[in-house]
Amino acid sequence: MKPLNALQITLAIAWKDLQVILKDRGLLVVIIALPMVFSMLQGIVNQRFSEENQNQLFPIALVNQDEGSAGQQIEKSIDSINVLQVFKPDSVNEARQDVLDSQVLAAVIIPQDLTGNLMAYRPSQIEVIIDPTQEQFATIITSLMDEVVAPAAIQSEISYAIRTLLSENQTYQQADDHTRRAFEAQNIAVQMTQVQKMQTDPWINVTARTQAGDEVVVVPQNLFALLVPSFTVLFAFFIVGSMSSELLKEKREGSLRRLIAAPIHPWMVIAAKMLAYVCLVLIQVGLIFGVASLLFDMPLGRSPVGLLLVSAAMGLAATGMGILVAALARSDRQADSVGLLLGFVLGALGGCFIIASPIPLYKGGGTMEIISKLTPQAHALMGYDILLNEAGGAVQVLPQALVLLGFALVTFLIASKRFRFE
Amino acid sequence: VNIWHLTKKDLLVFFKDRGAWLWLFVLPLVFLLIFSGLSGLSQTSGSAEGSSDQRPTLVVVNLDEGGSIAQSFLEDLDRRGGYRLVFFEHSEAIERLNLYKIGRYLLIPAGFSSELSQGKPTSLELIVHPNASLQTSEYILKAVEGVARDTSLELQILDGIRQMGEMQASDASGDQIFNTERILGQAKSQFERSRETPLIAVIQEVPRVEEGTSLSVLNLSTTIVPGMAVLFVFLAAQTAAKGIFEERRAGSLRRLLAAPLRRWEVLAGKMLPILILIAIQIGFIFAAGALILPVLGLGRLGAGSNVLAWLIASLVIALCSACLGILIASIAKSEGQITGLSNAILWIAGFLGGAIIPAFFLQSIPMLNILSRFVPHYWATSAYYDILARGKGLVEVMPSLAVLLIFSAGFFILGVRRFRFE
């Protein structure tokens, strides 16, 4: 048989198979509709949750019963904290009720005689009533208040220290009113300087720094670029069960045996079936990525060739696995079940499930990363990650494509030794 | 007796069907392992679940080990900072931060204590992952600053007195007023006093609430296992439907019509084995969860404080799924429809109903929040969550169970009306 003829026949069989596949609504639902719906639903939820998390404000109620400067100073400090949304009910009872109704996370009560107590160096208490149903977060408000009251407390401590030292001194005791007022003025100046210093140049400076560097794994800003490929790859490998059970059904019904009698090589039939399923994967990726890009601005990268390469290599890896399962399974039902299980287990190990952490297993470090990279799913996802999130090109995804093609070749070779046409 | 024979026969058929085993027991187990395994991997460290400390965690790297001021600072931070401190080695913290397994960590530099002891300013650093919430970082900074200011109070007082001393330097008696020994003594006594009785103490009050009204933290054991149970219990409906469909195709249902039984009696008889199977399935999933979760450090799974409520809720959920199975079998025209369409609908319903990701994530999106009410999964997960996480009893979960019973009645009536025996 001439090579051109063989190709034509293979393409003709593949076209026939593809038409049959496209009529299988159950398969189309699983391969195309489910990943599309899942990735979009989860994308919407995660995107919203992430935005809410970034802009999360803690509602609190503030009741300032102190009319002096300390109360005002603390109230002003609380108002200036960006993460707080401050409500000011008229009374303590009202604030307490707001807490009990979970309208606010906590109520902060500044006592009536705070300024007077500070001036007299008497201890005071600021009460934080927290919502018992959100206790684990509400306690954060209590810790924030520690920071808020610090300037007023430090002012009073310094004032008291200086006054104590002065009071023990004879010169000060014998000084006239004018001199004493001068001492007091200096004391106040010291307090002010120290409060200012505490805020601008504290003894223990606490700063935040964002970690940078190539080794930092960053979650894509558009979460759809993470979730859509994950679900697409997960469900693409469900063709393993479908393809293998279909092959075994054909074998059981004798259609494969009949083909052996035809003047074509039996493996052309298999190659055609693989081609048809690879086309299905390409249609799946094209549709899902296209819709995600249109509806949710998911980036598609800059390399359509790269996308085609990774998708085709993934399709071949999946179909190679399909033939292997068909070669090893005893019945079409068994092949279907094994294909389904493999799809879920390898998908999970490969990093298709984004649960609890937005970092997929294949870049999560440790042993799990090594195990993850043994699955074809991980390499398909890595390829899409490079294309979609790092704007890589076809050359950058060649290693992933080669691994997938290698996987397809190995499974195909093993299957070709084991598969029986009758 | 006849119904029992029928049930026994059906149970035997189900147990011989490996596909049914896959959907009823194997896949739930695989999913449970995947979900809990991935959640376990993303835990910061030993979980606080099961213990009374439910505060959010703050990772700390202490390079000043043995430093007394660092130690005292950390004790204060743990006591008042609103966070449960988790200590890591520096390299481990960097690795985890790079992989976004933690959002941030607090770094205490080497020499922190000695520098402060020598009266030199020092600094603390909060190192943040680029994707971590800015808001969260901000309130952690505030909390740390608050504790840091208290730690440096002694230095602050000393500095204030020294400043006053410098102002008095022109005065001949100035040196005598603020001699070093006296200054140190005064600052130390005030610092010690402030630790015992802070000048402004922030006290926290947690109002008492009725038991069971507290919303607990996102406890993975109380969301993953019930979620998986609900997802697969309803997916079992399609396995049941497939069984019934097979019988219709084989003609055994037609033969049953010859028996002196009404249509609904035959269908009710068909439901009994399904109900038993699903009840076994629920027991299996919860038992597996109870065994797996503690191994992964995700807390313990119990049947809540009310075993009876859990048992009745499980039976109602199983009934609802069995009725759904009858409905699917009555509507589906082919096996492909059962595996494809109903599969898709049940997975999506599972997602919307909070079986795959907790319902409260979905509730942040009004549209999904409304849609979720229209699927039985939502009421099933709500009932389980109320019993297991909120410790509610049978009476309190009655509304959810009532809705499930309405769903069941609806499915059954529709199923009986549309059911074709041949």
Image (spheres, rainbow, N blue to C red):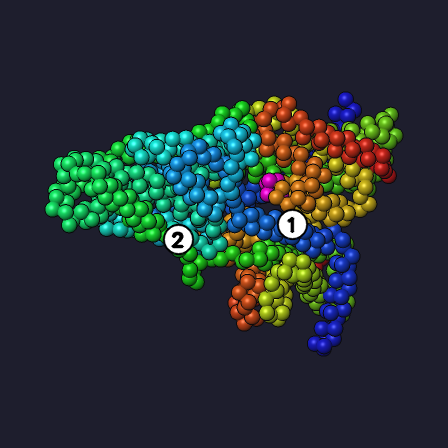
SS at badge 1? helix
- Residue A52, percent across and down? 56, 48
- Residue A20, percent across and down? 77, 59
- Residue B44, percent across and down? 44, 44
What is the span of residues highlighted in magenta in the rendered image? Answer: B357-362
Of tags 2 and 1, the one toward the viewer is 2
- In the rendered image, which quarter is residue B288 located in? top right
- Of the residues shown, which amino acid type is indicated by label 2? Ala
Q: Residue at x 75, y 47 (%)?
A: B341
Of residues A229 and A64, the one nearer the viewer is: A64
- Residue B85, percent across and down? 38, 41
- Residue B360: in magenta span: yes
Whether residue A148 appears in this view of the structure is: yes
Left or right, B370 with reference to A58: right
Residue A208, numbered label: 2
- Residue A237: in magenta span: no
Vertical comparison of A266 with B196: above or below: below
Q: Can you identify the residue that label 1 sits on?
A: A41
Whether residue A365 appears in this view of the structure is: no
Q: Residue at x 40, y 47 (%)?
A: B141
